[in-house]
Amino acid sequence: MKSKRYAFTLVELLVVIAIIGVLVGLLLPAVQAAREAARRMQCSNHLKQLGLACHNYQSVHGSFPPSAMVNLNTTSTGNNGSWGVHGRILPYLEQGNLYDRVDLSSAWDHQSVIDGLKIPIYGCPSDPGSFQVRTFTDNRPALYPTSYGFNFGRWFVFNPSTRQGGDGMFSPNRFLDFRDCTDGSSQTLLAAEVKAWTPYQRNGGPATTAVPTSRGEAEAIVASGAQFKNTGHTEWPDGRVHHTGFTVTLAPNSDVHYNAGGTLYEQMDYNSWQEGKNGIAGSPTYAMITSRSFHSGVVNVVKVDGSVTSISETTDLAVWHALGTRAGGEVVTQP
């Protein structure tokens, strides 16, 4: 008598495979969500470290660092090579060895020690552009971008002829302190997320100095620029707002369209002039450098008091403006 053999039929095997496929399909989004939650938490930790570094800098120097130090005795410069906040807070981010080897009194763009150097805390793990190194055709060192910008205020950034700075917490040639933040350190932004490799227009306009409040106004201002670049936030040592800052002109994650050479860019920035590039002869700088993030629906920020939170992209623009000013006198309803 032959013994019976037990095995799956072809139909049963196909059913099992189909069930496994469904389960994997259900599991993958959960895995991706868990990974993004971990990346978002790491991003928040990076901002926390930036806030603490600025606090430590203030404890040592009696003020927050300037966004740049611009020589206003000159009438023409080839490039604004002044170190920005990222470079000035290095010793408070456990980068003391690097800080000892750079010279903040000399332009960053010819200091080989930073060539190809990635400082992990300056990149959001959800920002793919932060891992894409930028190279140059001249003698400047290769750089990894940054995903975090410091708060330059609403719109106006700097006027070299009057030495006047903007209404944020950072400005060229200015050493602001907690006492200058009369709106309250818990009501004022210190730094926020930005996207590496953001395209922008520069060196032109604007037709009006009023703060733009709509996408149409923003796109008209972008179109007034004379030079298109797709390299925003790619020079972490540089003190110019389009590389290491942001403004609260537009709400977080705002779209601003611009057609450059037949290519439509959906998230554009704008800098009317590279603040102080030509020293005292330079034009005033107005900048629309928007805080943007790869975290869905929000941007992570750190406030002057060191607290880290997420701000929704649907936050009312008036509230966002109030958070960006240090002494505007606004009553802020927390988003």
Image (cartoon, rainbow, N blue to C red):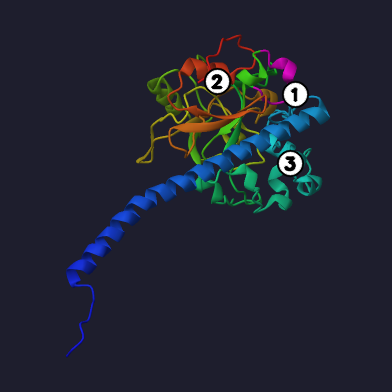
Q: Give the range drawn in magenta.
A: 169-182
Answer whether residue 180 is magenta in the image: yes
> Mark 1 highlights which residue?
175
Q: What residue type is labelled 2?
A: Trp
Q: What element carries label 2?
A: loop
Q: Is the magenta stretch mostly helix, strand or loop?
A: loop
Q: Is residue 163 left or right of residue 38?
A: right
Of residues 167 and 202, the one drawn nearer to the viewer in this rendering: 167
Query: Which label number is shown at residue 221?
Result: none
Which marked residue is nearer to the observer: mark 2 or mark 3? 3
**In the displayed structure, would residue 85 be above or below residue 120?**
above
Q: Is mark 1 on a helix, strand or loop?
A: loop
Residues at marks 3 and 1, CA–CA distance in whole angstroms: 17 Å
Residue at left offset 57%, top offset 30%: 301
Mark with earlier residue (3, 1): 3
Residues at marks 1 and 2, CA–CA distance in whole angstroms: 19 Å
Mark with earlier residue (2, 3): 3
> Mark 2 highlights which residue?
155
Mark with earlier residue (1, 2): 2
> Mark 3 highlights which residue?
90
Residue 212 visible: no
Q: Is mark 3 on a helix, strand or loop?
A: helix
Give the residue furthest to the front: 1
Q: What residue type is labelled 1?
A: Phe
Residue at left offset 30%, top offset 60%: 20
Residue 169 visible: yes
Label 2 neighbour load within 10 Å: few <14, some 14-19, many 20+:
many
**In the displayed structure, would residue 240 be above or below residue 206?**
below
Q: What residue type is labelled 3?
A: Leu
